[in-house]
Amino acid sequence: MTKYILGGISLPPDSGRDEALAAAAKCLRTSGIAARDLAVFRRSVDARKKEDVRLVYAVLFTSENEIKPQIEKRLQLRRAAAEELTLSHGTAPLCERPLIVGFGPCGMFCALLLSREGYRPIVIERGADVDTRVRDVDAFYGGGDLDENSNIQFGAGGAGTFSDGKLVTRIGDSRSAFVLSTFARLGAPREILTNAKPHIGTDILRTVVKNVAAEILALGGEIHYGTRFLGYAEMQNGSRRIKTTAGDFFTSALVLAIGHSARDTYAELLLRGVHITAKDFSVGLRVEHKKADIDRALYGRFAGTKNLPYAEYNLSWNTKVRGVYTFCMCPGGEVVCGASERGGLCVNGMSRFARDGENSNSAVCVSVFRGDFGGTPERAIDFVRTLEQKAFAAGGGTYAAPVSTLGDFLAGRDCKAIGDVCPTYMNGRVRPTDLRALFPAPLAETLCGGLRAFGKKIPGFDRADALLSGVETRTSAPVRILRTQALTMEGTDDIYPGGEGAGYAGGITSAAVDGLRIAEAIMAKFRPFS
């Protein structure tokens, strides 16, 4: 018995699961394939032609007989990858339990796998648990002080907890299937297993994060919230003493899943002489349109069809020197304040599973090269921090977001009033200004070129009353902590940097996969903790 995937089943947008399975069964039967256990494997939208929008299905099935190579080729069948991980355990003793710094996707999945295999990891997280973190963010949105350790960036689940909960990835790692199935097992909607662009939404993701934490604890792991990493020292027995704001811990395997906003940790590592390099990254703005307008622009007369998801786009343009692209598109979402340092302001996008808000938003980002900031990791961080401080000042120093209509931004003038697209940021706490003035001229000019180009790709994208908010700076880490093929930090054999903060992932799924890879590396070296 072999499991295959049959793709390319194109159906009208009002079709559903039953029609897809029936079409697949007919195709397989006609080709002489004895198939059973048919199930929808993937569903996507083909909206390249607005006059003929289609739903495209891939169907998983089990073949009762060997399929001839020529039939495999003609139907473009592919064999399904296994969802279970292939694990091995080493023989080296663990003097101290593994310790993971950070409980974002990388740290969560590293801790979860280690817990399942008997390694009893310890997790320290500078931010709060989910419920406390939600209260802290709500208090901040209500006019309270920014908590620099419990906010939209820091706390259980990492920055992804306050996002759209996107699980799309292009890394092509078979561990992605394990990540998705784990999310579904722990509370995410099962449709994430079949949608081509799966998302959980911030509301459901919060429950999933709590369930992940509960399973780690039930399996013998520990999670210490409100515990900030301060550094480490090597002990005589080869283990390390980990210094934190809650006292010392000891470990034989240290995982740095710190997230891309832990600038104080970067500073500590740089002082120690850790090999950290600056890398190219991107910065930009959030653009908001009315969700109904984006749906009509992409789906035409099919907008509003029951089985069609809210429209999403993914755009790019370049000058052959510098590129502009959209990122983290949130249909029916809101723009949120992603600040984690006092005196600095950045924005991000978030939506609930239902995506039932009036606006759709996405980041519009422009490339930043090492030559733009001087090439060192310190200057990379300073470049981003300076942009955030300028945005904070432009917003009036109260965490109100500086905003501009797209028309005013393209014209390079001060924005005086907002149009028909109402801001979703922090209950409308925005300040019209000249957003273009926040960026170095080459970046601002390229952003303008990209916005105009996107207007040619999606009618109405560049409409004058589309709303821009600034600044988007946390798309990825501006630095990378160098590591070996064994996934250990250069110069060490027991410290494992991983995820977005270390520069090895971009998004929830890829960060989770990196956490799994690190857990596998630790397990391949050490036997379970006893």
Image: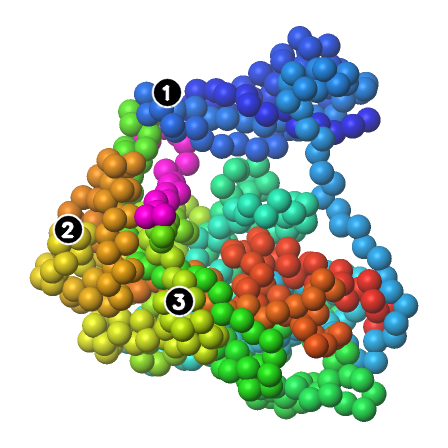
Q: Find the distance from the CA under tag 1 to the CA under tag 2.
A: 32 Å
x and y percentages locating residue 396 in the rendered image? 20, 75
Contact (Cβ within 8 Å) of mark 1 with mark 3: no
Q: CA distance from mark 3 to mark 2?
A: 30 Å
In the rendered view, does 421 fall on the left or right side of 490?
A: left
Place of residue 20 in the rendered image (x, y in percent of width and height, measured from the top left): 56, 22
Instruction: Tell me the residue that label 2 is attached to.
Output: 407
Front label number (3 vs 2): 3
Three-letter residue code for mark 1: Asp
Image-based side of 282 in relation to 507, left or right: left
Q: Residue at the spot x=67%, y=24% of the render?
A: 77
Residue 371 circle label: 3
Q: Position of residue 193 (x, y in %)?
A: 59, 40
The answer to whether any part of residue 369 appears in the image is yes
**Residue 281 within the magenta-colored segment of the rendering:** no
Type of amino acid at the residue the image marks with label 2? Gly
Disc 1 designates what residue?
52
Let me know if residue 317 is in the magenta part. Answer: yes
